[in-house]
Amino acid sequence: MHPILFSAGPITIYSYGVLLAAAYLLGLWLAVRRARAAGVDGNKVMDLLIWVIIAALVGAKALLFIVDFRHFTSSWQEFTTLLRSGGVFYGGLIAAIAVCIYQLRKHRLPLWASGDLFAPGIALGYMVGRLGCLLAGCCYGKPTDVAWAITFTDPVANFNVGTPLNVALHPTQLYESAAGLVILVALLLIEKRPGHFAGRTFWSFAFLYAVLRFVIEFFRGDDRGLVLNALSTSQFISVVLVPLSLFMLWYLGRPERPEAPDTSARGPRKPRFA
C-alpha cells in the first residue's frame, strides 16, 4: 500500500501516524459529543480522554514489546522498529481502562455510565486506525487465494514491519476495520433498545470485540507469540474477556431487589406456632 504519504527533505509523513491521529481525534470527538448530550462537563471528559489516549499509546507498544521481547531486544536496530510499530490493541485498551478508572474517580464521574459514553468512540477510532494498518502493511494476514486478497509491494512496509511482499494475503486490516464498524452500529442500536442499564453499552462492546477479534486472529499472518502453544495473545485475552463481559452484563442488568420493610417501629414479634 502506501506506508509513506509524502516526504519533503528530512521530513517523512507516515500514513499510519496520520490515520492513528485521525482515529484518536474522531474517537475523542464522538465521546465528548455524547458526553455533552448526556449533560456531562465536556471539559472534564476532554481532559480525561487525553490521558486515556496517552495510556493507550504506551500500553499498545508495551504489550507488543512483551509479546515479541526476543525480537525487540535482539539488537538496537530492532528495538527502534518498536517506534514504527502500531502495537497491540488489547495492550492499549487495558492501559486505557486503568487510567480511565483513575481519572473518573479524580473527576467524580460515574464509572459504568461513563464507559457507555466512551465505548462507541473506541469502536470508531478502532475502525479508522485499522485503515492505517492497511496503508502501513502491519497486522497483515496469512497467504491466501481468495478473490479479495491483497498484495503488498512497497519495500518500506517490509523494512518497517516485515510485511511479505508480492504475496497474496488475507486483508485482515480490512476485516478488523469492518469489525469496528459492525461494533459501532451494534452499540448505537443496543442503546435504543428498552431496559438500558449503566454498563450495558461498554460491556456489549467488550463482548463483541472479543468475539470478532478471536475469529479474525485465525487469519493473521504476523508473529504475535502464542499462549499455551495454542492461542495468540489476543485470542487468550478474548477467551478471558468473553465470559467476563457476559457476567458483567448479567450482573449489572439484574433487577433491583426490593428494600426490606422497616420493622423497627413494630412491636415484639410473636413466636410462630404459639
Image: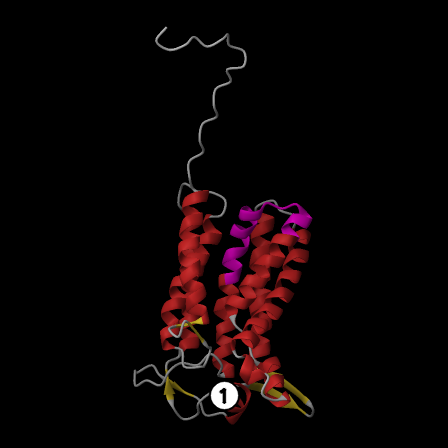
Mark 1 residue element:
loop
Q: Residue at left 61%, top 89%? A: 75
Q: Position of residue 36 (x, y in %)?
A: 60, 49
Is 101 drawn above or below residue 256 in the view shown?
A: below
Q: Residue at left 52%, top 75%? A: 67
Q: Position of residue 135 (x, y in %)?
A: 50, 82
Q: Residue at left 56%, top 70%? A: 60
Asked if the magenta segment contains residue 28, the reply would be no
**Residue labelled with disc 1:** 162
Is 52 drawn above or below residue 3 in the view shown?
A: above
Does residue 95 appear to the left or right of 197 in the view shown? right
Front residue of 94/164: it is 94
Front residue of 201/250: it is 250
Asked if the magenta segment contains residue 105, the reply would be yes
Q: Residue furthest top?
A: 274
Q: Position of residue 95 (x, y in %)?
A: 58, 63
Q: Amino acid at mark 1?
A: Gly
Q: Residues in magenta?
A: 103-122
Does residue 91 appear to the left or right of 215 in the view shown? right
Front residue of 184/259: it is 259
Which quarter of the rendering shows the C terminus?
Answer: top left
